[in-house]
Image: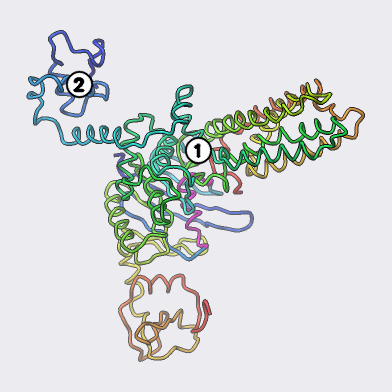
Amino acid sequence: MMGASTLAVDRLQRRYGRSVALADVSFSAHGGVVALVGPNGAGKTTLLRCLATVLAPSAGVVHVDGLDVGHPEQRTAVRRRLGYLPQEAGFAANARVFDVCDYVGIVKEQRDVRRRHADVLRVLGEVGLRDRAGDKVKSLSGGMRRRLGIAQALLGRPGLVLLDEPATGLDPEQRLLLRDRLARLGEDATVVVSTHLIDEVAALAHVLHVLDGGRLVWSGTPAALTASAAGRVWVSPTAPPPSATVRMSWRTADGRHRCVGTPPAGVELVAPTLEDAYLLLVGPTAGPGDGWG
Amino acid sequence: MTSFAPLGPLADPPDGHPPPVVLDAYRSLGADDLTATAVEVHLHRCPVCRSAVNGGVRAERLADSWALITAELDAPRRSWFERMLGRVLPPDTVRLMLATPSLRRSWYVAVVVALLFGLSAANPRRPDATVVWFLALAPLIPVVGVALAYGRGVDPSYEVTVAAPMSGLRLVLVRSVAVLATSIAVTLVAALGLGRSPDGHLAAAWLLPAFALSALCLALSSFVAPRAAAWTVSVVWLAVVVGVSGQPDPLVLFRWWGQLAMLVLGAGAAVTVLVRRRAFDVVQGIR
């Protein structure tokens, strides 16, 4: 076990041509589960790619245990402490589950074959795929393939684990198991998880960073973000008219409308959820009827 | 770390038992793998030492040993092809090679079809044309294979691989050699079909251009995405071949001076690959 790595991100920028994907992002972490949330295109995947050393920042620095990922020699040392699940991790359909992880073990420089094989079986066991070790990837369901992706990220017991949308394709039971696994992982490693599932964040993350338009717009605990929405969530028996004070509203199962924004006088305020607070931060300013149509 | 050296890892010491310091090291997880294995072999047949360490071995040691044993039992056996290659190459290198995306059955079907197309499209009344078509096409097959061996869009594990500490250049070279060796073997078989033409001795003249263009493709891949590099190399090469085909000797590119030019080009490309090796350590094709 390497122990949790220290991650320090300082004024990180990433541009694609003229488009700015990340602008002056700074945060640090040591141990625990850190969640990155934000709407599509907010820059979560770009940030994770920069942390994973696969994408060079346009400006700013990332340090892992004091090592600069921009420095070629130090980058290799960082990669020895790293486990990474990309958003679009795929594996050759005809490869066997065991062989996929064994291959990753080889490129992770696990040279002792016996220990590498034991590690492969360990990580497959942790995601419930040990009994499928000899099966081909093409025989796995989408959720199982995602679990295989998570398994390879855990090889070598990395001190920094970066997971981009790990819960994609998992059914509710598997998500619960993933939460449990990540919570335990966060005791010995720094785990950075990108997700758009707010309930995952509430159940799992010690710290939350909200990205919007490439900028970090909020950092803190999930409880603190939820508390920031106090007094700004209400329910209404009818759909509120479009207004600059109503950030978002939506019809709920009981037929009433839940609204976030600046409440008008006399409305029924309710306790905010993390999702309410998140929508207040990054949701579009829109009246009823906007959205998917 | 403590070891039995110089007695040899599996030999018993003169008094028949490992020294207490070695047993203590084994108990406290301080012994290296070789020493621990030697102690375990001894313990298997020595009840005296077994009772000496009994109860003193930490649970982690037992769990670790058990994990290694079960891994040996549970790890799926490598395929016969992989085992066969593993007799002449390091097994881990073989595994890296066999993960090459372009080393697939569909790739070789495409290679054969492309070669047949090249041969059949040639004018049977002009044997020269057959040779030109073949020589123009054959060097591009490994180029395409190299481009499809590594990179975004072709290797589903690409980002995972880039984020690993192994040198990107090493992996690219291992895969490129695998593709070159196999595609050249297939193309050599097709080259036998040229034996009857007057220029049949040129059937192997595509080999040096194949190496040079593949090296050029790798060198360009350090600047742009591998597929873009392959396209560029292929288009330029075909343009040159077509341009030269109007000359009195359409095969002039494949005569001795053309081969020399290819050698120089390939050497220059190889140097560029070495100089630009760090470019293979980050995701290519994103600027």
Quarter assignment of residue A230: bottom left
Name above or below for residue A135 compared with residue A278. above
Q: Check if mark 1 and mark 2 are on a common chain.
A: yes
Q: Is residue B45 left or right of residue A224?
A: left
The spot of residue B263 in percent (x, y) is: 72, 23
The spot of residue A143 in percent (x, y) is: 39, 56
Does the magenta run of residues contain A216? no
The spot of residue A151 in percent (x, y) is: 36, 47
- Describe the element under mark 2 as helix, strand or loop: helix
Nearer the observer, B69 or A202: B69
The residue under the point 61% across, 38% down is B108
Say whether residue A218 is visible: yes
Quarter assignment of residue A177: bottom left
Residue type, mark 2 in image:
Val
Q: Is residue A13 left or right of residue A77?
A: right
Disc on res. B99: 1
Which chain's residue wears label 2? B
The residue under the point 35% across, 91% down is A266
Disc 1 packing (10 Å; few <14; some 14–19; many ≥20): many
Say whether residue B222 is visible: no
- Describe the element under mark 1 as helix, strand or loop: loop
Nearer the observer, B188 or B92: B188
User: In this picture, which residue range is highlighted in magenta?
Assistant: A41-56
As measured in the structure, the alpha-carbon distance from the residue carrying label 1 to the one carrying label 2 is 37 Å
Name above or below for residue B199 compared with residue A202. above
Return the disc, 1 or 2, that comes first in the chain's sequence: 2
Disc 2 packing (10 Å; few <14; some 14–19; many ≥20): some
Residue assigned mark 2: B41
The residue under the point 38% across, 82% down is A252
Residue type, mark 1 in image:
Ala
